[in-house]
Amino acid sequence: MKNKTKIILSLILVVSIALGAFLWNNQLQNYSDTPAEFDLSPLDFFNNKNSSNINPLTGLVMDKKMVNARPVAIMINNLHSGQPLLGVCDADIIYECPTEGGITRILAVFKDPSNVSAIGSVRSSRPYFIKIAKGLDAIYIHLGGSTHAYQILNSGFIDSIDLIKEQFMWRDANRLKNLGLEHSALTSGEKLREGIKAKGFRTELEKNYKYPQIFDKSSPVLSGTSANKITAVFSGYKSTTFTYDEKNQTYLISQFNAPQMDDNVKKQNSKPNIILMDISAQNIDNTELLSLDLIGNGSGKYISRGKAINIKWHRPNDTSPFEFFSADDEKPLIMLPGQSYVCLMAQWTHVNIE
């Protein structure tokens, strides 16, 4: 009788162990089948708003020593004849704005450009780019500028480096030969470090400055409407297309019917976060030069992970950064961690979302 009892108990134990192993293995399989958008990736663990090693412009981990560094904001040529670009893959934020004659220009913002070997081609300044850079407490880099831009720069409104004297830059021989003088001016992280040191500019953010954007994996964009291909039509000459790369959870950027290439790395530029801002603009002094209205409130869209939601933007003055809010509940917008591409769309432009 005792032997039978022992046998029965042994069988029960064996069955229990086998069942537990099956359930545990099944649970692990469930975790491995979790959709990518809910994976607990390293970014999610680093995405702590109170962390001391998070880049405030992207929500991504970075060198702790650079977290409070002032960014640099660099004017980059975006003419068809000036392609390819250099350094744009490393930019934390890119602002593309309309300028005169239907063309656009880019303001590329780098929190830490120290390892970027070439940036450009660097082009001339316009007033609204200066004011965007000021709102980031950035050091502004340009080569020449409009009369109105120089009026602002000469007032001391922002710390800036003008490459017009051909200091802290170089002319790329290949671009000079094949693309012309206006598309040949390049700078680099090392050259910018030299220039900032020579100018004696403050290298840390102002004590009370805070970039207001919130980054977290719980962004409402994940519940947005489908947005797999976005075309921002600035003019008959210039459109920018963003095509969602689901595998890498980013948007591949194209323009002039070709990829927007970064010649440093020989690859197509891409950004996981796209922001479209509706703005108003006017011609000034009976010329093609533009004035963009960047103070006050406006609407737009935030696009990421193949989804889009309506947003609102707010900017109280020319020294403040843009603040974004969800249009539905007007709470501060939560963005997914990553670099951003921002298109400022004037009233004559339009956007197609597929």
Image (tube, grey):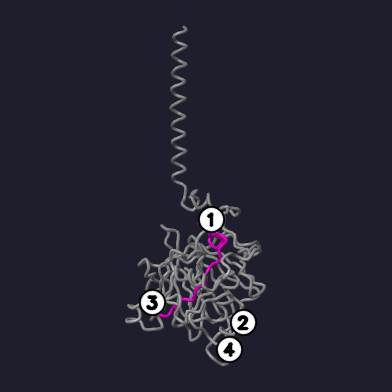
Mark 1 crowdedness (10 Å alpha carbons): few <14, some 14-19, many ≥20: few
Q: Nearer the viewer, mark 2 or mark 4?
A: 2
Residue on which disc 4 sits: 284
- Where residue 208 sits, quadrant-wise, is bottom right
**For the residues marked 3 and 4, what is the alpha-carbon distance in whole angstroms?**
28 Å
**For the residues marked 2 and 3, what is the alpha-carbon distance in whole angstroms?**
33 Å
Res. 315 visible in picture: yes
Do the numbered discs 3 and 4 sit on residues whose CB atoms are within 8 Å? Answer: no
The residue lying toward the viewer, choosing from 217 and 109, is 109
Residue on which disc 3 sits: 83
- Where residue 219 sits, quadrant-wise, is bottom right
Do the numbered discs 2 and 1 sit on residues whose CB atoms are within 8 Å? Answer: no
N-terminal label among 3 and 1 = 1
Q: Nearer the viewer, mark 4 or mark 1?
A: 1
Three-letter code, disc 4: Ile
Residue on which disc 2 sits: 155
Residue at (46, 80) in percent of width and height: 123
The residue lying toward the viewer, choosing from 114 and 59, is 114
Three-letter code, disc 3: Gln
Q: Secondary structure at mark 2?
A: loop
